[in-house]
Amino acid sequence: MTADRPSPMVELGAWLDEVRAALPAAGNRALAPEEQTAILDLARVAARTSERISAPLTAFLAGVALAELSSEERATKLRALVVGLEPET
């Protein structure tokens, strides 16, 4: 680990800021709390419905597919995706 890198335990907001800074195409797009919740729900459903490794890949695919939408639209589409993929109990 280099001196300019944060320690392994970084607060979520600081971590997301660092990731955004490392991805210039992300610009100033921040994740709204509703988006964070929906993405985590999507990852949960993916990990519990398929192999655990499907969680980050599913989140990536959703991010690519929904990137051009507004924050509100992304959160709405993510919630709908979670509902559609979550197995019935």
Image: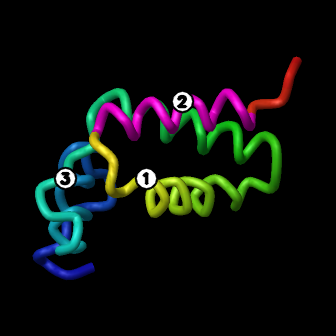
Q: Secondary structure at mark 2?
A: helix
**Residue under the image location 49 percent in, 41 percent down:** 39
Question: Contact, CB < 8 Å: mark 1 with mark 3?
Answer: no
Q: Is residue 19 above or below residue 24?
A: above
**Residue under the image location 70 percent in, 38 percent down:** 45
Which residue was labeled with disc 2? 79
| In this picture, residue 89 sits left or right of residue 55 | right
- Position of the C terminus by quadrant: top right
Q: Is residue 84 above or below residue 15?
A: above
Q: Amino acid at mark 1?
A: Leu
**Residue under the image location 21 percent in, 47 percent down:** 30
Which residue was labeled with disc 3? 29
| In this picture, residue 18 sits left or right of residue 47 | left
Start and end of the magenta stretch?
Answer: 71-85
Q: Which mark is residue 83?
A: none
Q: Is residue 79 above or below residue 64?
A: above
Which residue was labeled with disc 1? 66
